[in-house]
Image (spheres, coloured by chain):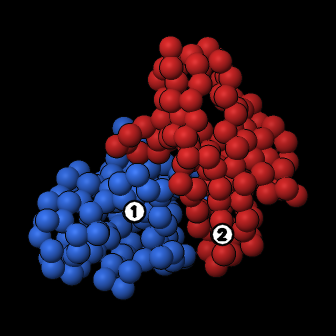
Amino acid sequence: GQNIDQPTEMTATEGAIVQINCTYQTSGFNGLFWYQQHAGEAPTFLSYNVLDGLEEKGRFSSFLSRSKGYSYLLLKELQMKDSASYLCAVRDGTGGFKTIFGAGTRLFVKA
Amino acid sequence: DSGVTQTPKHLITATGQRVTLRCSPRSGDLSVYWYQQSLDQGLQFLIQYYNGEERAKGNILERFSAQQFPDLHSELNLSSLELGDSALYFCASSVEGLGYTFGSGTRLTVV
């Protein structure tokens, strides 16, 4: 089966850097995604990692270590609009390519 | 507009009833995924279709069924509705290997 763990909530200050961690267990790892979801809205794709290392995209970076079953999303120069839930999701290639989502980390950015 | 269209946006119905949710994927995407998100819960994977064929199944209840038609739109049928089925139902589409694009969701309220 699959298991994805990430912190429930985090608080950070505008302009700061925050790191959201995610650990996972899956039998058929085929990539890891990060999504942003504002309350009541659809998730939007942020990043995709399938090989170990860091992927940088503007203010957002995502890191993956497959051997450790670990990823993090790094948000720099935080803005108030970054207040949202951040969902870690693992793609499992066993029996079809389904993507399983973690419960999400609710990030509060304060002034 | 993400390119994934879901209808209706809101649906209120009584317990025991049956409803159909509709999704049109983004142009060119062959895969359609259905997810359920209850209040303050993570996204729960229901089912995936690829080019008309069921490809992967999650924890979808027997009261729920889905299909993908030749024009690639998909329908999720929910029957014998219970109060606990109240949730946001998201449809997503993708090109295999890339991130999902989500529709804006259907908010189902069972009273």
Quadrant including the N terminus of chain A:
bottom right
Visible residue check, residue B28: yes
Circles 2 and 1 on the same chain: no
Query: Within 10 angstroms of label 2, few (less than 14), some, or many (20 or more) residues?
Result: some
Residue that extends furthest to the bottom in the rendered view of this protein: B62
Q: Secondary structure at mark 1?
A: strand
Q: Whole-percent x and y of residue B15? A: 15, 74
Q: Secondary structure at mark 2?
A: loop
Q: Is residue B8 above or below residue B16?
A: above
Identity of the residue drawn at 36% across and 59% down: B38
Figure quadrant of residue B88: bottom left
Q: Is residue B8 above or below residue A97?
A: above
* Amino acid type, label 1: Gln
* Amino acid type, label 2: Gln
In the drawing, does residue A53 fall left or right of residue B54? right
Name the chain under label 1. B
Q: Colour of chain A?
A: red
Q: Nearer the viewer, residue A69 or B65?
A: A69
Q: Whole-percent x and y of residue A80? A: 48, 20
- Disc 2 + disc 1, Cβ < 8 Å: no
In the drawing, does residue A95 fall left or right of residue A62? left
Give the residue pinned by disc 1: B36
Q: Whole-percent x and y of residue A30? A: 73, 62
Q: Colour of chain B?
A: blue
Identity of the residue drawn at 56% across and 58% down: A101
Name the chain under label 2. A
Give the residue pinned by disc 2: A2
Query: Within 10 angstroms of label 1, few (less than 14), some, or many (20 or more) residues?
Result: many
Q: Whole-percent x and y of residue A52? A: 85, 48
Q: Is residue A40 above or below residue A100?
A: above
Identity of the residue drawn at 31% across and 60% down: B87
